[in-house]
Image: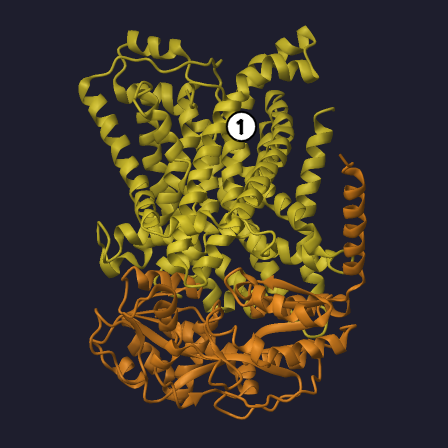
Chain colours: A orange, B yellow
Amino acid sequence: MYSVLPRIGASLIFLLFCSGLQAAMPTLVVYTYDSFTSDWGPGPQVKTAFEANCSCKLELVGLSDGVAMLNRLKLEGANSRADILLGIDTNLTADARASSLFETHGLSLRNSALPADWQDDLFLPYDFGYFAFVYNRESLTNPPTSLRQLVEDADGPTLLIQDPRTSTPGLGLLLWMKKVFGDDADAAWARLAPRIVTVSKGWSEAYGLFLKGEADMVLSYTTSPAYHIIAEQDARYAAAAFDEGHYQQIEVAGMVRTSKQKQLARDFLEFMISEEFQKIIPTTNWMFPAVAGETLLPAEFGELIDPSPALLLDEQQVAMQRKTWVDEWLEVMSR
Amino acid sequence: MSRALPAGLVLAVLALLVLAPMAGLLQLSGLPGYEAADLRFWDNAYLRRVLYFSIWQALLSTLLSVLPAILVARAFAMRGQLPLRRLLLGLFALPLVVPAVVAVMAVVSVYGSDGWLPLGRSLYGINGILLAHVFFNLPLAVRLLLPQWQAIPQHHWQLGEQLGMSTWQGWRFIEWPVLREALPGVLLLVFMLCLTSFAVVLTLGGGPRSTTLEVAIYQSLRFDFNPARAVVLALLQLGLCILVATLTLKLHRLPEVEIAESAPVRPTSALRKWLDLGLILAATLYVGLPLLSMLIDALDGPILKVITDVRLWRALTNTLLIGLSAAAVSVFAGWLLLRYSAGLAHCGRPTVARLVDLAGSIVYVVPPLVIGTGMFVLLSSHVDVFDWVYPIVIAINALMGLPFVIRCLGPAMRRNHARYHNLCLSLELQGWNRFRYLEWPLLRQPLGLAIALVTVLAMGDLGVIALFGSTQTSTLALLIYQQLGAYMIPQATVTALLLLLLCLGVFALLERLIGGAGNVAH
């Protein structure tokens, strides 16, 4: 019979040693949106993979969305704990650039999967997607083939969209309409309005209502059907391919200027555009990886529509005009 | 005065919690990079429209919720022996805790184009907003008004019978005077709830035509990042509620007669009995159908997968922790305020008493987003706000629960004070003994309702936790929201059902433990 006390003592010392080790490790703080950090988002896998090699601790702080992240960083100023901001899109980059809170990353996106060349000193993309109207193949047999057709056919499908004041896809559609119809966008919205069942606060309300059968189509992403195919083995849902092309959303990350561990931050950005990180993206964030690679995409993504040509407005133009455009939209939609 | 000091402290904390964040936000607008507030409201057609629509939908929703609630509460009061009465009343506490996103889905399950009672496209617009708001608020108003009938002394009914009063006369001379004490507060509370409604209005409203002040505040603070305008709009919303409060208080009368605890026992005709049962049935169906649709959706969902997830249990623990703590803080603060205002009303200063109650209630309409962002501005340079998630979330939820505490406890505490205060003085019954021997036995019932209500309210909160919560500090409501945002709608319906069942359990348990057995509002 031997005493258990020495064993407990040894375990305690071991534990202390471990926690001591942990305290000595640097912590990299990444501000991101909470669907990134959620249990089914990319967060947990990204954390494990990065921590395996960095001898550091990765702390992902989930905030409600890109706007919230940027606002918080602005409010915190030099006191911010953040080293990296991950998850703003190109509609916010102009604003973020103007804040001068970000540092040149000094990296280049090799082997880019983006439709256009990426040249940006401050922000590096990690994924992208295209907005699209998603429908149920069984209930809508002849979906419109262009945005123009969708707008002009008065007997066309009914729609669920999101509010550009509160939602990213909502703003995406506003810009998409601007890109396609230019100065006639107001008239196009007026024609579309009678078929818009409702304009929801966020993506989830509209998508939920769509699944309940409240309208023929919902504003979402070209990748949405992939979720239903992969996670639910349900092939009923499809995105309608439009001739004019689809408006693009590019999600980027940047290094915070006041970060005290810039090398580690740069390592993270490097890791972010590596294959290991990129292959996590498709089935957790349900977006396209920013880096091209045969093995990165699950086979089911091959069944998705071709969204080309990719449409994108210049970030400066969006930053300057956004408010006016939203006001115009409010005016038309409130008639 | 020994009662003024704690109450004054509570009021000071309230003012600090509401005004300091606003000041913090205003101070930002002077900094470079921030826009100054645009104060020319009446030049702005958009804001005028928003203001008009906010008031209109809130007034209509309030009337449609509270007027039928009077009839339903009366029917419940008259049918004290109804089987399943306790369960039905428990059911009536549930809509309040359903997160708005889930409630919208539930309403659509019933009235949507594939629903049980399809309204088609006409659901979207004012119809949908009213349907959802009545679903939320009618049951709440029933719960808050029901105890008033209990306050009618037995001998009033007997006297009425001897005098041969008709039903109308009985209502006019026996019931209405008692109802008048609670009705203004309930009207104001429901008005505030409808005025600050956000996701329901935007989603079921059909489009930006249905924009409320709350949406405009959100837009200013998030989309335009113009903190000064957000503060101005929040103050406008506050002012609006004070105006409505002043109007509803015109209706308010403190009962002049001595009041005793009793249950209405009165002979009624068979016709009346069936009418009451019909009313109860109609209200139960109205409240129950959307809940039933949630149940059916959830039973169809991946139950096992959801409940075997350890993260669900973590969220559940957080939910309970936040709910119970917020209720404890809220009820304690409310108790101190009401004790003071009851004393004031008793010694001939009812106006001041009303102002104290009003101050406790009105803070509800300051959006959590404004308080939260303002707090962040003030605190972030001194502490890491996210280390303080629980205290902050609990404090704001306690603040939001205060108007409910005041509605539940207010009338009972005032009655109690009016009746027994002099007796207590002559017996020198005070402090703990007064609570133990006088207040606890007489007030435990409304106290139980208040604690139960605020607990489930905080458990269902999304507005505050969405600002500060993270994966580690997730609650069930936040989990539902995250699942909905990640295509996991079947999972979200299961989580929503669990939240509901948990709330039902906690509500029943608290009401029974604190309120005492065998007397739900009766």
With A118 as the anchor, is B509 left or right in this view?
A: left
Q: Quadrant of residue B2?
A: top right
Q: Position of residue B79 (x, y in %)?
A: 30, 21
User: Secondary structure under badge 1?
Assistant: helix
- In the foreground, B4 or A110: A110
Residue carrying label 1: B409
- Callout 1: chain: B
- Residue B40 in sight: no
Does B477 sit above or below residue A59?
A: above
Considering depth in this image, is B230 or A21 the residue closer to the camera?
A21
For the C terminus of chain A, the quadrant is: bottom left
Q: Which residue is at the far left?
A: B271
* Residue found at x 33% / y 13%: B265
Instruction: Work out whether residue B198 or residue B4 is closer to the camera in this orientation and state it.
Output: B198
In the image, what residue type sits under mark 1?
Leu
Screen quadrant of the N terminus of chain A: top right
**Where residue B518 sits in the image (x, y, percent)?**
42, 18
Which residue is pictured at 38% across the width and 12% down the height?
B156
Residue drawn at (70%, 55%) of the image: B385
Q: Position of residue A205 (x, y in %)?
A: 40, 61
Q: Position of residue A241 (x, y in %)?
A: 32, 83
